[in-house]
Amino acid sequence: IIRQLGKVESELAVGAYFQAMIEMDFGEQGKRIVGFIAQDRSSNLGAWMPEHHLRAAEFAELCSTRSIPMVSFMDTPGADATEEAHANNQAHAISRLIVEMSNIDVPTVGLIYGLGYSCGAIPLAAINMILSLRDGVFSTIQPASLANIARRLNLSWQECAQIVGVSPYELHGQ
């Protein structure tokens, strides 16, 4: 679909990470290059490794220095939580992306079109405007993780759901 919007200036796909600069025609306003960052659910369910967060930070900085507006697409169960990801400084990479996305001086829009959980979506949500499809989900924690915490600490499902913003049904089903 993206290719049909305009001429692709550059594109990079590595594992669950996708970025592109596309020249788009805005009618009377003329043509403009727009940067896109997305998570590819067909690879690792869209969960990014540290190198993906760092690539996204570099891309955000590049778009900012070239005054290229950005769009981020979010559909992820969260950042990769494997031992390998943590050994390669996943927390630092996520933090760097949050900083870069917060500091860029170009218009930014984010679209949640599926799951937007945890540190997979939070860095891409540090933008000017977040939009969501009707069935899009954005939360700082996955229901399964929250259910695990609730069980360990003997907390009520309802109390956790109210605080986080997911329904007790979603929590209990995990």
Image (cartoon, helix red, strand yellow):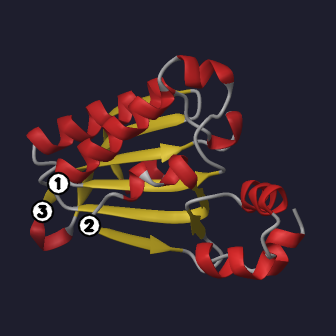
Q: CA distance from mark 1 to mark 2?
A: 19 Å
Marks 3/2 in contact by CB < 8 Å: the verdict is no
Task: Please give the residue where the numbered disc 3 appears in the rendered image.
Answer: 30
Give 36 or 168, whichever is nearer the viewer: 168
Left or right: residue 13 versus residue 77 is left
| Mark 1 vs 2, N-terminal side | 1
SS state under label 3: loop
- The spot of residue 55 in percent (x, y) is 37, 28
- The spot of residue 41 in percent (x, y) is 66, 44
| Mark 3 vs 2, N-terminal side | 3
Q: CA distance from mark 3 to mark 2?
A: 23 Å
Task: Please give the residue where the numbered disc 1 appears in the rendered image.
Answer: 32
- Look at the picture and state if 39 lies above or below 156: above
Q: CA distance from mark 1 to mark 3?
A: 7 Å
Count the marks: 3
Which residue lies at the image location 12% right of the left edge and 62% below the top edge? 30
Local crowd size for mark 2, using a 10 Å CA cut-off: few (<14), some (14–19), many (≥20): few
- Which amino acid, mark 1? Arg
SS state under label 2: loop
SS state under label 1: strand
Which residue lies at the image location 46% right of the left edge and 30% below the top edge? 52
Task: Please give the residue where the numbered disc 2 appears in the rendered image.
Answer: 128
Marks 1 and 2: which is nearer the front? 2
Marks 3 and 2: which is nearer the front? 2
Marks 1/3 in contact by CB < 8 Å: the verdict is yes
- Which amino acid, mark 2? Asn
